[in-house]
Image: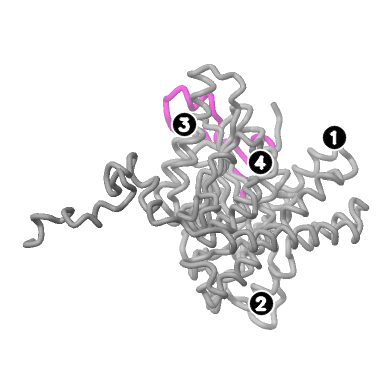
Amino acid sequence: MSSAFSTGKFTAQRFPLKTTSPRSHDNSVFVPLKIPNVTSPFLGSTLKLRLSSSSKLNLHRRCGTVVAVSDVVREKKSKSTPNLLITKEEGLGLYEDMVLGRSFEDMCAQMYYRGKMFGFVHLYNGQEAVSTGFIKLLKKQDSVVSTYRDHVHALSKGVPARAVMSELFSKTTGCCRGQGGSMHMFSSEHNLLGGFAFIGEGIPVATGAAFTSKYKREVLKEADCDHVTLAFFGDGTCNNGQFFECLNMAALWKLPIVFVVENNLWAIGMSHLRATSDPEIYKKGPAFGMPGVHVDGMDVLKVREVAKEAIDRARRGEGPTLVECETYRFRGHSLADPDELRDPAEKAHYAARDPITALKKYLIDNNLASETELKAIDKKIDEVVEDAVEFADESPVPPRSQLLDNVFADPKGFGIGPDGRYRCEDPKFTEGTAHV
């Protein structure tokens, strides 16, 4: 079945595996288009790579690659719907989800500086096209595994703004009852399998979720189990061992998973160019026998088209895909980061490519929405976010007795007595150990 990720369209040549295993005849290895040796189009704010003030910002990086993806998408789409990439309903839905993510994160910044949130808080501003472009195509039964930058992924997956904000406020009404906080959003109801504080932690969890789907379908014969898993992670994770191990495992077992790299060009304060031998992450996919695709992560429509093909491919049982979304965060690494390392010209360039502004222009230019309709959505989202803050602020803090919940299989048999009090509060708890 021909697809946007088919070998004929995305490879300059086949690269046969050097093995006598039967797999070498069954599975082609996807090799992305070869790019001529040119100066790296990454902007990366390093002394050697920084553009001179007299030169123009020419940031059409990977000249052939983005165009190749876009052309395939455009060609494929034009055959079925010659006019527009999305319907009005779809467009308004995408816009609302992106505005919700942006407004929510802006409010988080306010609440953090007012002392309502604690610890590290990593905001998603600027990257909304990736979350919306991928997650809004999922079924409720599909799974999402996130990173420490997880608030917006949770919102896109359907976790209520009240529950996310309450979790950030460490309140019992949060999606983890106040015990997870900013970096550990989780909702079994919405199949959000967690945010993870350490890079790479979530990729094995996502791979396991994808294996569960395949096992249910092929071993337990649950014919309707076509669930797909999305694993989100950043560019810094792609030099981590778990990334390579899980790509290998997913390809070997043809798991229904999409590995989504949110390449915002910076791993905390380390430029992506200085941290990896080959900055084109999508090339790592073909090394394991899966398609590797690069897409403009600041354009929700391009992300959505690539995401649709990758998700459908996984759902059909054709295996994993590695998608590199080149995006940019508009704030520092966290709210504790003064963001003084990145070149102002770089930040200004990407700010001018705001994904929400771009979608808004597309909707208006193509008569899919009016200014009035979009302003109504903005107002609605403002009310949702304000309500989430009021709800979180008025919610109770967790009781002390909840501290060991979900830590041990039977917390009352370990640290809390039958009366609900901590055993360490019993005067006899340390009897005989005072001399130690």
**Residue 124 quadrant:** bottom right
The answer to whether residue 24 is left or right of residue 308 is left
- As drawn, the label of residue 10 is 4
- Residue 91 higher or lower than 13, as above or below: below
The answer to whether residue 227 is left or right of residue 245 is right
Q: Residue at x 8, y 61 (%)?
A: 436
- As drawn, the label of residue 252 is 3
Q: Nearer the viewer, residue 173 or 26?
A: 173
Mark 2 vs mark 4: which is more N-terminal?
A: 4
Mark 3 vs mark 4: which is more N-terminal?
A: 4
Residue to which mark 1 is pinned: 80
Residue 372: % across, % down: 91, 60
Closer mark to the observer between disc 3 and disc 4: 3
**Secondary element at image label 2:** helix
Q: Residue at x 59, y 52 (%)?
A: 163
Q: Residue at x 49, y 55 (%)?
A: 178
Q: CA distance from mark 3 to mark 4?
A: 21 Å
Closer mark to the observer between disc 4 and disc 1: 1
* Amino acid identity at mark 3: Leu
- As drawn, the label of residue 345 is 2
